[in-house]
Amino acid sequence: MGASASSLPIEPNRPGPLTRPKLEDIPESCIALVLSHLDPPEIAKLARLNRAFRAASSADFIWVPKLPSNYPYILALLSDQGLGDKGKKDIYARLCRPTPFDGGTKEVWIDKRTGGVCLAISSKALVITGIDDRRYWNHIPTNESRFQTIAYLQQIWWLQVDGDLDFFFPTGTYSLFFRLQLGKVGKRLLGRRVYNYENVQGWDLKPAQFQLTTQHGQHAASRCMLGNLGNWVHYHVGDFVVEDPNEKTNVKFSLTQIDCTHTKGGLCVDCVVICPSSVGKDMFFL
């Protein structure tokens, strides 16, 4: 009976079996619209699903609102000026990687998740009292710094580190940090980090003072005892607010410990980091 049934002719107008819809059947424009509501890391994950999602993830309208408002200014700092002709996704991906400027003493990048603008300022771009006298300070090469070098304080009575930055920041609230460590960095021994604490002194007697000011009179200050031997610490100086993205923001900042009743030593100064406060909270306030 089964054989005779299978030999029956199929009616031409009779509908065949229904097929289940697949991801590939979703229109690319619909996929792109959904992706536009996601964060960049989430978009990157979904782009690996198939060709349709990968193609949709490249739509410019997804990435334009995720790029910082000052991205043309950052692009102008790049040595590869041809990037401006690329799609917005490619521009976003490139800006997530650090871009050195001012002779390699500063770097700018955007946070992968939020698109917020972040900067790092090398110790070589800071004005450090006594930096040219090797009795007090030395520049030490190390791969523990994004700039491959840090300033190391051997011993001094008057500690003063000043910095000055002019930059077009997008609107928002930004936090400023000094990246410091007590203990001289050294080469790795059998894969372990090695530090010299011999010159560490004076930091438990009086607090260090941090300050920042902007051209519009914003001011922030903090004081704390330096500690956590052998570990890099981001010391929060304070926050400042940018209201006009079309005006260069000038930020002056400093680290001081000028109580001359005792010497200070054994301090590594790596860099100053500026980033959106929301990013800094996630990265450094752990």
Image: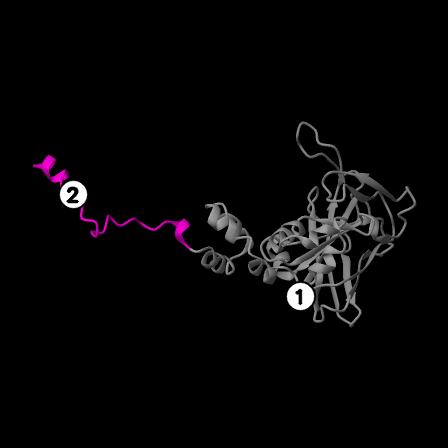
Residue 125 lies within the magenta run:
no
Determine the residue positioned at 73% across, 38% down: 143
Q: How is colour applied across the structure in the image?
A: one colour
What percent of the width, then of the height, locates residue 64?
60, 61
Disc 1 and disc 2 in contact, CB within 8 angstroms: no
Q: Residues within 10 Å of mark 2 (few under 14, many from 20)?
A: few
Say whether residue 224 is visible: no
In-front residue for pair 81/102: 81
Mark in the foreground, 1 or 2: 2
Residue 22 position (above or below residue 2): below
Residue 11 shown in magenta: yes
Q: Earlier in the sequence, mark 1 or mark 2?
A: 2
Q: Residue furthest right?
A: 133
- The amino acid at mark 2 is Pro
Q: Find numbered disc 1 in the image and state the secondary structure of the residue it sits on.
A: strand
Quarter containing the N terminus: top left
Give how far across and how far down residue 51 sits, in percent: 48, 46
Q: Is residue 4 above or below residue 91?
A: above
Q: Judge whether residue 55 can be spotted in this image.
A: yes
Among the 4 quarters of the image, the one containing residue 229: top right
| Residue stretch in magenta | 1-26
User: Going by the image, does 66 lie left or right of 105?
Assistant: left
Instruction: Check disc 1 and report the residue beneath it.
Output: 173
Q: Is 124 displayed left or right of 13 in the figure?
A: right
78 in relation to 149, above or below: below
Magenta span: chief secondary structure:
loop
Locate residue 214: give its quadrant: bottom right
Viewer-closest of 44 and 87: 87
Say which residue label 2 marks: 9
